[in-house]
Amino acid sequence: MLSDEYVQYLARFEAQVGRIEVGAYGQWQGKLVRKLSIDEFRAKLSDFTALHNTYAQIVEHGDTIDNALLKILRERASELLLEVES
């Protein structure tokens, strides 16, 4: 069974990139993105969630944000067709 998050991802992908096969590439906000399989999606969502939680803790504590962390967070978000507020 597909997870709700993956179903939402597929809907975002079709609406914002187009109807293409898993593994194929498309354009999203000027970036080349690959449509992920459910297993790839789960792994990337896990990575993104961990990075986003770290980012949120840094912001909450008022610490300095490393530009590399923000760059990686944005890259992971784009793989999932998510936008990150910074």
Image (tube, grey):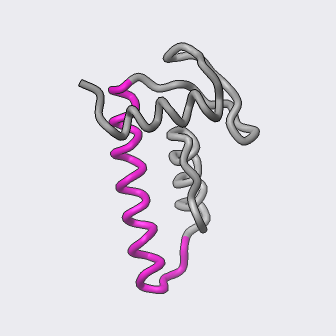
Q: Residue furthest left?
A: 1
- Check the image and name the residue furthest to the right: 30
Q: Is residue 22 left or right of residue 47?
A: right
Q: Residue at x 33, y 26 (%)?
A: 39
50 and 9: which one is in front? 9
Q: Quadrant of residue 45?
A: top left
Residue beneath the point at 52% across and 54% down:
73
Tell me, yes or no, whether the highlighted magenta stretch contains residue 27.
Answer: no
Query: Which residue is depicted at the point 54% across and 80% down?
Result: 64
Secondary structure mostly seen in the magenta stretch: helix
Q: How many marks?
A: 0
Residue 81: image x %, image y %?
56, 41
Is residue 64 highlighted in magenta?
Answer: yes
Looking at the picture, does residue 85 appear above or below residue 39? below
Horizontal and vertical percent position of residue 83: 58, 53
Q: Is residue 66 left or right of residue 4?
A: right
Residue occupying the point 42% across, 85% down = 61
Asked where in the image residue 31 lies, by quadrant, the reply is top right
- In percent of width and height, residue 43 lies at 35, 36
The span shown in magenta is 38-65
| Above/below status of 44 relative to 67 | above
